Amino acid sequence: MPASRWAPHTVPQHSHLVFVPPSLRVRLSFPASFLLDNGPRCSSFMASSRRGDQSNGTIDPQSGAPLELSVAFPQATPASIFPPASFDYYQFDDLLNSEERALCKRVRGVMEKEVAPIMAEYWEKAAFPFHIIPKLAELSVAGGTIKGYGCPGLSITASAIATAEIARVDASCSTFILVHSSLAMLTIALCGSDAQKEKYLPSLAKLDKIACWALTEPDYGSDASALKTIATKVSGGWVISGQKRWIGNSTFADLLIIFARNTSTNQINGFIVKKGAPGLKTTKIENKIGLRMVQNGDIVLEKVFVPDEDRLPGVNSFQDTNKVLAVSRVMVAWQPIGIVMGVFDICNRYLKERKQFGAPLAAFQLNQEKLVRMLGNIQAMLLIGWRLCKLYESGKMTAGQASLGKAWITLKARETVSLGRELLGGNGILADFLVAKAFCDVEPIYTYEGTYDINSMVTAREITGIASFKPAALRKSSRL
């Protein structure tokens, strides 16, 4: 577009026209000052577009450098200084025991102090802050419910609460831990040999080594049981060939849990593949709009040799992966709970600080209704998540119950972060105030570990006895 079309224009105080490109000009029926006071200024936005600036759209005219956010927008506190928790309206905390409350407090403290100040920067550049891994290790949550081998042996409720508290500040960090702990480590714990557990779990629990979990393939996402990566038995081990996609942590993982089809039995087997194995290649997936700090990757395996000692003896069919997914699906349901907890806390503070028309935004009825709707959603999400944990602990939880929890909670999370985005107006599209970042981060969580539709069908199959994963004309029997 020619530069002249974006030349600076001065908008008179009471003009009824705001400058836009000629093809998009519209006439407004209110003073332009109203529009310019309701979020980032239009002229600043156009200036940032011309300069290619990605900061906050406000430039210091003397140096050309972006202004500090506290100078550019002094009326509200950014998420780098995280607000006190205010989401627990029905005193859910009373349902936790003293150990769970202590864990909650410890995780919250570390996330607010160590992660909140840096998360917007790393999210913007889609990089993972490796320097915080030692701080995350100090939380002693990696390994979750696994007992022994240096793992914390938490109750599933405690593990879920930790997941939520991490996600409250940053969803990407919670995904990093979830993939490493509730998928990779749990697979070794549930499906590995004693020797494998002793060899791998202690270093994974301390985050000295990082793991990923590779099930999804380019051609098989929801239909994961049809995966076509193959494992062929050879002398002393196995040769694996195939491709995986969307695998979190894969670009830097020391251990990769790979699922492949046994060419002899046609069943799914599991393998531990080490970083740097000949024939193994991982590349980062770029241009994501959500969970940008998470390093999702493509994995290509070209005749990768895996010794017999690294085949997981407990994975002999796709059904064996469900033992892991049943737990991880509960953990994933707690991620959006944590996200909306943080969004509510930010919005509650913002509405009290930000003023328009001579009053704080919290004084307007429409804003109060949205905030209360968000609060109600959070109470319901917390209680469903808590009940799922208790069903699991008692041995009563079914796959359908886990799927309903994940599906419904992520659906409500989408609604809740959307309300939060509305409440913050123009600042609702800045990662500096968390809500824009959370708005994007909920989207991949709504999709992974089973889309909303797939999880709904898992629950529907359980209550109706009828599987509907394939069109009726193609369906013979469900593999799921």
Image (tube, grey):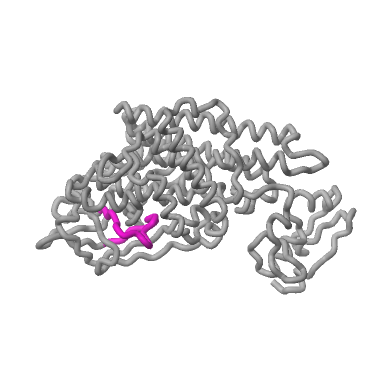
Q: In the visual, does 163 lie left or right of 23?
A: left
Between 64 and 421, the one lying in front of the other is 64
Check the image and report above or below for 66 versus 216. below
* Residue 232 percent across, percent down from the top left: 16, 59
Specify whether residue 478 is in view: no
Residue span colored magenta: 242-259
**Any magenta on residue 310?**
no
Q: Nearer the viewer, residue 84 or 214?
A: 84
Image location of residue 386, percent across then percent down: 43, 30
In the image, residue 290 above or below residue 478: below
Say whether residue 5 is left or right of residue 79.
Answer: right
Q: From the image, which quarter does the C terminus lie in?
A: top left
Name the image quarter holding the N terminus: bottom right
Work out whether residue 448 can be spotted. Answer: yes
Q: Quadrant of residue 182?
A: top left
Q: Is residue 256 magenta?
A: yes
Name the residue at the left extreme: 235
